[in-house]
């Protein structure tokens, strides 16, 4: 399954599918239109089926894109692999997890 970013209304988005080297390039610019719609966004990753370092890089890029536009970006239901990779790269806590 390819990865899909969709609006769930009221500043909420869902991200579903595989976040890997194949799907991430197609997702990189997809957050920008949503960043223009308000000052806060939440992205739910509950439906992410696979997550690797490309997915981690995408989430980091989206955090930076939001910061530059002064938009608060929150991630919900981060995949288990996220925690492992964040720890490996010394990024624990950057995404709001403890």
Image (cartoon, grey):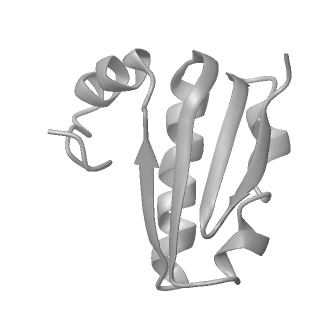
Q: Would you place residue 34 above or below residue 6 in this image?
A: below
Percent position of residue 8, x then y: 70, 54
Viewport quadrant of the N terminus: top right
- Residue 4, located in which quarter of the rendered image? top right
Which of these two is toward me, 43 or 86? Answer: 43
Viewport quadrant of the C terminus: top left
Q: Residue furthest left?
A: 98
For the point 26% across and 40% down, the residue is 91
Percent position of residue 74, x then y: 42, 57
Percent position of residue 15, x then y: 67, 39
For the point 62% across and 24% down, the residue is 48
Is 90 left or right of 46, judged from the image as shown? left
Q: Would you place residue 80 above or below residue 38 in this image?
A: above
Q: Would you place residue 28 above or below residue 4 in this image?
A: below
- Residue 11, located in which quarter of the rendered image? bottom right
For the point 69% across and 82% down, the residue is 37
Is 75 left or right of 11, judged from the image as shown? left
- Residue 9, located in which quarter of the rendered image? bottom right
Is 57 left or right of 28, judged from the image as shown? left
Percent position of residue 30, x then y: 79, 57
For the point 85% across and 24% down, the residue is 2
**How many numbered tags mark residues here?**
0
Which of these two is toward me, 24 or 9? Answer: 9
Q: Would you place residue 38 above or below residue 29 in this image?
A: below
Is 55 left or right of 19, judged from the image as shown? left
């Amino acid at each position: 399954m390819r990865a899909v970013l969709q609006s769930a209304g009221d500043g909420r988005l869902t991200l579903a599918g595989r976040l890997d080297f194949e799907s991430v390039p197609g997702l990189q610019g997809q957050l920008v239109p949503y960043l223009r719609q308000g000052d806060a966004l939440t992205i739910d990753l509950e439906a992410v089926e696979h997550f690797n370092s490309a997915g981690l890089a995408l989430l980091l890029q989206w955090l930076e894109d939001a910061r530059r536009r002064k938009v608060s970006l929150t991630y919900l239901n981060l995949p288990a692999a996220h925690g492992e990779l964040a720890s490996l790269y010394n990024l624990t806590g950057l995404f709001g997890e403890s």
